[in-house]
Structure formats: structure tokens, C-alpha cells
Amino acid sequence: MTPLSGEDDIPIGSLFSGYGGLCELAAAPLLRGRVAWHCDNDPAATKVLAHHWPDTPNLGDITAVDFTTVPPVRVLTGGFPCTDVSTAGRRAGIRPGTRSGLWSVMRHATAVLRPELVLIENVRGLLHAPAHSDVEPCPWCLGDEPDVPALRALGAVLADLADLGYDAAWCGLPASAVGAPHTRYRIFIAAAHSDREPLRPQPERIGRRGGAAVAELAGAVAADTEGHRRHERWPEPTRIERRPRSPLGGAPDPPVAWGQYEPAIRRWERVTGRPAPTPTVPGRRGNAVLNPELPEWMMGLPSGHITAVPGLSRVDMLRLPGNGVLAGQAIAALRYLLPLLGITAHAAEIQAA
């Protein structure tokens, strides 16, 4: 198997695609790749994918896909459902019968497709939520204790990748580290197949040392964004209108009082190169409701990436950003992780070290 070497048009498979934050907007531009196929059956997400990537096939329901018939890819990405590992969910963990248990399907897809690189994203709860395991709950215990988790969710994912022959590195990164006006902490995992040509140095696994790694990464990102520098694919800065136009048209809205969030909002305006949308719009009964353009902007998405897609309800427009990942955050994490696997990632290419 030849290593990734800065080639163009590297085929990438996108599992649990959502609005395209991890694969379509982050991994594909970073790796100079092309998305060979999506895989998502959420009705709203499929509309967004079809609107922006009409020529890319969507495999639909991941549980119904026969991956032996799927076109091969060299990179596989996926942010499997966080429902059961998130602190906002039931905390059931990764086990059969749970939404987060769909990791087992991504593991199966990895085993069948044998991509050279696997990229995974999930919530911070991956560090704490339990996972189904037949191992003992502690080194000095005998017998399985159902109320005592023997394995955490992140450990289960890393163990599965190791069983499949992949060397993995992981880190955690808040969205605020790349300038976003919110924390949205996410775990990122990159795994390279060990059948690749030998790479030097060997990948360093980031386990309990993850705290130091995160501090190093956050420092590097902060230095890179100092002076409001943007990632190469982001637009050049424009003059920021302090009184954004109402999305309903007419006269400019009065200035928004952002209060304690003012510095974070202004920073993100400078990073994205466009003004913050007005936070509320009139609802059906005339009462103020959240403007769907605001969470779209907060996730660093191009204007209209979600809100201009035909056929989406207001609930869809609010839910999709909530389930997605910020592309700039993913790019920063991958720039850090890939060199640990012996791969040097640049703004628009990936090549073996």
C-alpha cells in the first residue's frame, strides 16, 4: 500500500456526513481530496449534501450499506452519533442498541474498506462515557461487574482501531481555540494503517499525556490566529458593518448589545470576515425567536450553507449546526495529529514525512 504523498484527487469516504463539517469542508480541502460518497440518512442533512454536492452519491442508512460493494477510498471520515456519550444524553455509552453503538458499523466499514487513514470526531464525553467490554472492571477484580465500567468509550474506539491494524493519535480541542465565540470542545482521532511504508519517527500515542498535547496545540493555534490571521481557505477580511441588515429586509436593525460576549463576537467577525447576524427574528406570533443564521455563523459556515437550502424547516436549521463540527477546528486538530502519524499536512496537501 503506497503512502499518501501529496497527490490530488485522493478519494475520501464520508460517514455520518451531517452538513459536511468534518469531511467535505475540512478533510477534503486539507488533503486535496475528493469526496467519493456521503453516508447519511437524516432528511435535513441529505438536503444540505444534495444542495452543495449534487454529483456526490449518498449511501443513505449506514446500517443497510454493504461495504463490500462500495467504491474504495483511501481516507475514511466519520463523527458517529454522540447521543449516548454526550453529557446532554443518557450516558449509556458505546454498547449494542445505542445510537453511539453505531461506531461498530464504522469499525466494520474500516475493516472492509481498509483505508490508509481514518479520521474521527466526537464530543468530550467520549473520554468519560462507558463502553461495552468483556474485560475485567479493574486489575484486581474477578468477574464482570455490570455497574462498573471496565472501558471508556475512547478506549474502545482506540482498541478497535488497534485490532484492525491502525496506529492512532488523538487530542481534544475547543472551538474557541480557533477564534469561535463558544467552547464546543471536541475529540479528534487520526489513525493510519500500519501496513503503510515505514515512517520515521513512529507515531506517538497520546493517552494520559493528552493534557500537555492540548496545551501545546492550543498555544500553536493561538499563535497562528494572533493578529486575526485566517486559514488560507477563509475569505479575506471585509469591513464589518456594526449595524447588520435585518434578514427580513428594510432598515438596518439597531446595534445589538452583546454584553459580556461582545469581545468574542467581534473576534469571530474578524476571523470569518463577515458581521454577526442579528440574533433574533420575529416568530409566527410576532414574538422574537432565535435567528437560524446566527448558529450557522457561529459554526463558521458560509452564509446560507444551511439557511439557504430549500425545504428545511426552522427546526432543521437550528438542529444541524448543533449536531455538526466546526471545520476550522477540525483542520487545526488534523494539522496537529497527522504529523504524529508521520504525515505532514499543509494548508492544501498531505504528504508522507
Image (cartoon, grey):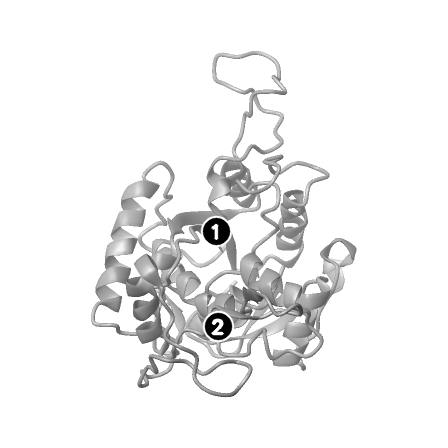
Given the image, on which type of amino acid does mark 1 rest?
A: Ser
Which residue is pictured at 53% across the width and 30% down the height?
Answer: 151
Residue identified by numbered label 2? 301
The correct choice, above or below, for 86 with respect to 7 in the image is above
* Earlier sequence position, callout 1 versus callout 2: 1
Q: Nearer the viewer, residue 288 or 328?
A: 288
Quadrant location, the C terminus: bottom left
**Residue 53 seen in the figure:** no
The correct choice, above or below, for 192 with respect to 87 in the image is below
List x then y, in percent, for residue 281: 54, 72
Which residue is pictured at 60% across the width and 79% down the height?
Answer: 308
Q: Nearer the viewer, residue 54 or 157?
A: 54
Residue identified by numbered label 1? 194
List x then y, in percent, for residue 80: 60, 52
**Residue 39 seen in the figure:** yes
Given the image, on which type of amino acid does mark 2 rest?
A: Leu
Q: CA distance from mark 1 to mark 2?
A: 35 Å
Q: Is residue 324 left or right of residue 233?
A: right
**Whether label 1 touches label 2, CB < 8 Å:** no
Which residue is pictured at 59% across the width and 75% down the height?
Answer: 307
The correct choice, above or below, for 250 with respect to 313 in the image is below
Q: Residues within 10 Å of mark 1 (few under 14, many from 20)?
A: some
List x then y, in percent, for residue 253: 43, 79
